[in-house]
Amino acid sequence: MKKFNYVITDEVGIHARPASLLVKEIKKYASKVTIEANGKSADASKLMAVMSLGVKNGAEVTVSVEGEDEETACAGIEEFFKANL
């Protein structure tokens, strides 16, 4: 399992548009991806689950990646976070 922490810098947090882009990014990989924030966790491949976390600007999230392509997936998802969130 690979993990990374990221502090959200998008001024409105993880709202509908970036959440849908995140789900599309996650679905490129075979690994299971989980996002934890505000004491809750969600399957990152499910849009409503990601949005239900209510992640705001300045919040720290922990992303866990587990599966056959976890190295590649973790690196790609971390780059996505840096570029979009």
Image (cartoon, rainbow, N blue to C red):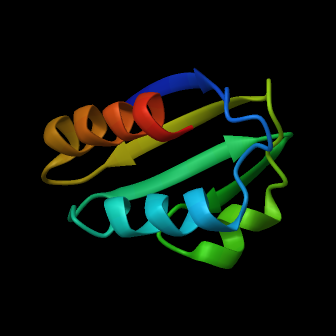
Q: Quadrant of the C terminus?
A: top right
Query: Count of labels shown?
Result: 0
Q: Residue at x 79, y 28 (%)?
A: 59
Q: Residue at x 44, y 28 (%)?
A: 82
Q: Is residue 38 left or right of residue 11?
A: right
Q: Residue at x 57, y 24 (%)?
A: 6
Q: Is residue 23 left or right of residue 51?
A: left
Residue 58, image quadrant:
top right
Examine the rendered structure and indicate whether residue 41 appears above or below residue 7.
Answer: below
Q: Is residue 2 left or right of residue 62?
A: left
Coordinates of residue 8 in the picture (x, y in percent): 67, 30
From the viewer's side, name the closer residue of 57 and 77.
57
Examine the rendered structure and indicate whether residue 81 appears above or below residue 15.
Answer: above
Residue 13, image quadrant:
top right
Coordinates of residue 63 in the picture (x, y in percent): 51, 38
Q: Quadrant of the N terminus?
A: top left
Q: Is residue 82 visible?
A: yes
Examine the rendered structure and indicate whether residue 79 appears above or below residue 73.
Answer: above
Residue 29, image quadrant:
bottom left
Coordinates of residue 60 in the picture (x, y in percent): 72, 26
Q: Residue at x 69, y 71 (%)?
A: 49
Coordinates of residue 28 in the picture (x, y in percent): 22, 65
Q: Is residue 1 visible?
A: no
Residue reaching furthest to the front: 11
